[in-house]
Amino acid sequence: MIGYLLFAVVFGLLLLGIHRKVIARIQRRPGPPVWQEILHMLKFSFKSTWIPATASNILFVGVVLVAIGIWSAALFVLLAGGSILIIFGIYMLHKIVEHGFGLSSGSPYGKFGGVRSVISAASEIPLFVSVAVVALYTQSLEISSIVQYQAIHGPLLFIVPLAAIAMYIVILSKMPFGPFSIVESKELVSGYKTEHFGVWRAGLEICNGLKTYVLMFMFITVFIGGIPIWWMLAGMILLTVSLSFACAFSPMLSPFDSVTVQMLITGVMLGYAAVLGVIA
Amino acid sequence: MMTKKKDMLRALALITGALLVIGFVLWQNGTLPLVGYEAIIVVCFPICVICLFLWWMAREHGEDIPFIGY
């Protein structure tokens, strides 16, 4: 289990490295090596670290521990085929973690990042509609039951494509350099994580690796089904590359535009769910 | 003072690391259910990693005052 957890961290960071590399190649830059995020994590872990004078000590440190802990829990729920609602609960909890990161530091950049994190909660609403549509068809919120349903009826990707697109957009909103990456946009330096440097940032990198692994794994499991691990890993790389293309070819939206687009997507998804509900 | 802090961090990393190993052994024996082992990982893994990093990081300096506006 601990071995799998470490593998998930490293592979998740590798996916983020691939993401950076693909974006760079699209922009005709050489880009960093694909293992750059793994090196980043190690580099930050060796850096001299302390707690800023203006920070709330307990929250500043505690939020890093919580960030790693919740995504570790999400990975175990996913592997056990548990309820998809628990994973989405953890996804929502991550929003509070981002907020905690920003507010604990006492830096205005961090605080703005935390506030934007709350604004971008609009991106989570399509997620719930997506889950509702999946539940409507599979009559279950257990991942193991969803996988069984797909073994009989085929991938949900082809049965409810709009729900898959909605979840894809949710994952897109969590990727760096994407159109909805308002939480970490450059005018805020590094957003909510501006003051979390050194070891704290290394901890955050571990959380990011786990989060990326869990979200990609979940998308493939929920919309394609249970597949062998090598196919799963190949699928995760393909998904990452497609997200990189989406990030590279779309502009970073301003906060209000980002929320407006996400609310429009939510509206479409609600209509879709309503139509499916009537048909079902 | 600094050495004492480093020793404490190393001890904490070792204790949580040992708990992870004990949890694994108990789970393999069938004494501890998988959920119990996973709960140990969720609690101990972040503490172990952060303490390990804080132990092996470069020498510490004074506190920093973040930029708080013009």
Image (tube, helix red, strand yellow):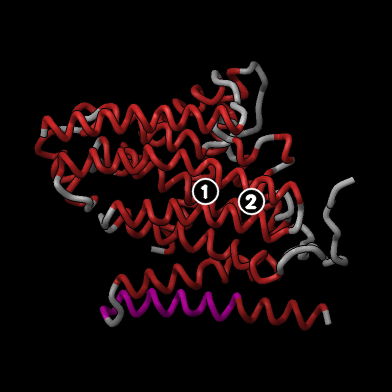
Which SS type dominates the magenta stretch? helix
* Left or right of residue A222, residue A58 in this image: right
The amino acid sitting under disc 2 is Met
Between B22 and B9, the one nearer to me in the picture: B9
Query: Pointer 1: residues within 10 angstroms few (<14), some, or many (20+)?
Result: many
Q: Is residue A258 magenta?
A: no
Determine whether A184 is above or below B62 in the image. Answer: above
The kind of secondary structure element at disc 1 is helix
Q: Which mark is residue A41?
A: 2
Which range of residues does the magenta coloring cover? Answer: B13-30
Circle 1 chain:
A
Residue A263, x across and y down, in percent: 44, 32
Residue A234 in view: no
Determine whether A191 is above or below A276 in the image. Answer: below
What's the residue at 57%, 71% (across, down)? B47
Circle 2 chain:
A
Residue A273, x across and y down, in percent: 24, 33
Determine whether A237 is above or below A78 in the image. Answer: above
Q: Is residue B22 magenta?
A: yes
Instruction: Check if mark 2's residue and mark 1's residue have beta carbons within 8 Å.
Output: yes
